Image (tube, rainbow, N blue to C red):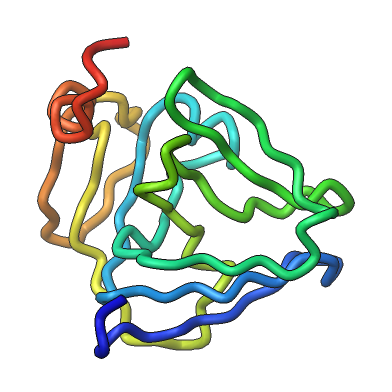
Amino acid sequence: MHNDAMTLRGSCLCGAVTLSVAAARQNIGACHCRMCRTWGGGPLLALESVSRVEIEGENSVSIYASSDWAERAFCRHCGTHLFYRLRTGEHYAVPAGLVDDGQAWTFDTQIFIDDKPPWYAFANATHDLTGREVMEAFDKGSD
């Protein structure tokens, strides 16, 4: 973990699960893939530079294997989304709202931009990646 990493804490709606997250930067990314939009009703806005996640109340965490290479976690009591991670554990995305305490976030990336529906758009200047570019970056091939 980097010495300059910040530690953020957050709990699910019912308080059964608490996350302690180390993040190297205060950057937020948006994922527009169909799965994220189905999971949360809109794009997933998440911390992408997470280097460590510690979980309190792990017995209340349910994991859904959403693909052969990734999984999503939520509180089994209240349904709060806790994280998306590669099954290898090398990458976590933690919903920003879960740990936000008024930080000066930098919204700098949008992924699966080619899956974004036309009825919304963010005004921020971001680095945009298509689904194919994301898969190539994580070396996961195509769908």
User: Residue visible at 10% across and 51% down?
Assistant: 127
The location of residue 15, given as percent across then percent down, is 83, 71
12 is higher (above) or lower (below) than 41: below
In the rendered view, does 36 fall on the left or right side of 33? right
Q: Is residue 104 left or right of residue 114?
A: right
- Point out the image quarter for the N terminus: bottom left
Counting from the top left corner in percent of width and height, residue 63 is at: 68, 38
Q: Name the residue at 49% across, 27% down.
A: 35
> Which residue: 42% across, 52% down?
92
**Percent x, y for residue 9?**
58, 80
- Residue furthest toward the top? 143
Number of marks: 0
Which residue is at the front of the view, 49 or 37?
A: 49
Name the residue nearer the viewer: 41 or 11: 11
Does residue 62 sit above or below 134 in this rendering? below
Please identify the quadrant where the C terminus is shown.
Answer: top left
Quarter occupied by residue 20: bottom right
- The residue positioned 43% from the left and 25% from the top of the image is 69
